[in-house]
Amino acid sequence: MAGILYLCATPIGNLGDMTPRVVETLRDVDLIAAEDTRNSIKLLNHFEIRTSMTSYHEYNKVEKAEYLVAQLEQGKNVALITDAGTPAISDPGEVLVAKCHEAGITVTSLPGAAACITALTLSGLSTRRFCFEAFLPADKKEKAEILAELKEESRTIILYEAPHHLVRTLEELFHTLGDRRLTLCRELTKKFETVIPTTIKDALALYETEEPRGEYVLVIEGKSLEQKKEERRESWQSMSIEEHMAYYEQEGLDEKSAMKQVAKDRGVPKRDIYQYLLAK
């Protein structure tokens, strides 16, 4: 019988957030795969967990995943932990999970802390719909493409950022998204937890005189549906009806559906569009 891979969430700051189920599992498994064994040994010692560890991180995730799958196929149970939070969330654990599924190995998740969800619930912004982008890519072209997508995003946006990149990221967000409501979160669950409801513009002003410290979670207001509708109305006004129809037909709508959508955009009955096109 193959073993089981356990995805074990660990505290993002406060050790009191470690669940009894995770502690028990980490004691019982045959091997713990940890992002940084030097950090994780402190956590394991605190909870008197003596299970053997091996490293599993961004730079060995492919070859080490193959090793861990082999261990699981031999019947060993393995727990995966990250430095803080839930494995596979903005984390190389996703590679190991995928390889386990390919090999038919059972994977289960022991839920717990996640910085993105903790920050979202503290933000005061809409929590009904949200998207998680984690860290923006270092590649300038790829980053520009993602920021362009986020500009049109109507859901609440969650980003991670390191202190030495925070101001630059805020500048890029302001340039692309404009001024939006923003909640800055740092030191989550720790003694000096800080939650700052602000705007992108005001956050930039704040860090003109204050040095960013600690890892940040940025929770950003999405573009309102009303604003998106208004922008669409403005764009339709510069189009002819023929151009408007062509736009939707290029999107894959048939003529009847395109006509209906054009009429809806322009706030007129569908028959008016039909009569106009018929006259042409």
Image: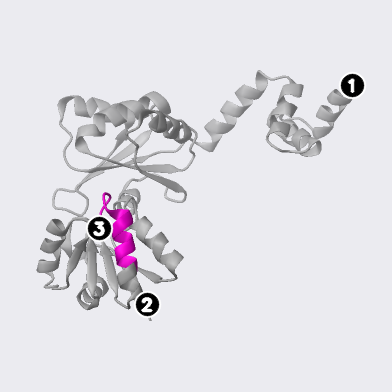
Placement of 106 over or under 90, stated as above or below: below
Callout 1 crowding tier (Cα within 10 Å): few <14, some 14–19, many ≥20: few
| Lower position in the chain sequence, tag 3 or tag 1 | 3
Residue 40 image offset from top left, x and y in percent:
16, 61
Farthest residue to the bottom: give it. 1
Q: Nearer the viewer, residue 211 or 192?
A: 211
Residue 81 image offset from top left, x and y in percent:
25, 62
Distance of mark 3 from mark 1, alpha carbons?
68 Å
Q: Which residue is mark 3?
A: 56
- The structure residue drawn at horizontal position 25% and vertical position 58%, both measured from the top left corner, is 56
- The structure residue drawn at horizontal position 35% and vertical position 46%, both measured from the top left corner, is 124
Span of residues in magenta = 57-69
Q: Is residue 63 magenta?
A: yes
Q: Quadrant of the C terminus?
A: top right
Q: Which residue is mark 1?
A: 279
Residue 27 image offset from top left, x and y in percent:
20, 76
The amino acid pointed to by label 2 is: Ala
Q: Is residue 53 visible?
A: yes
Q: Which residue is mark 2?
A: 2
* Mark 1 residue element: helix
- The structure residue drawn at horizontal position 32% and vertical position 30%, both measured from the top left corner, is 200
Placement of 194 over or under 29, stated as above or below: above
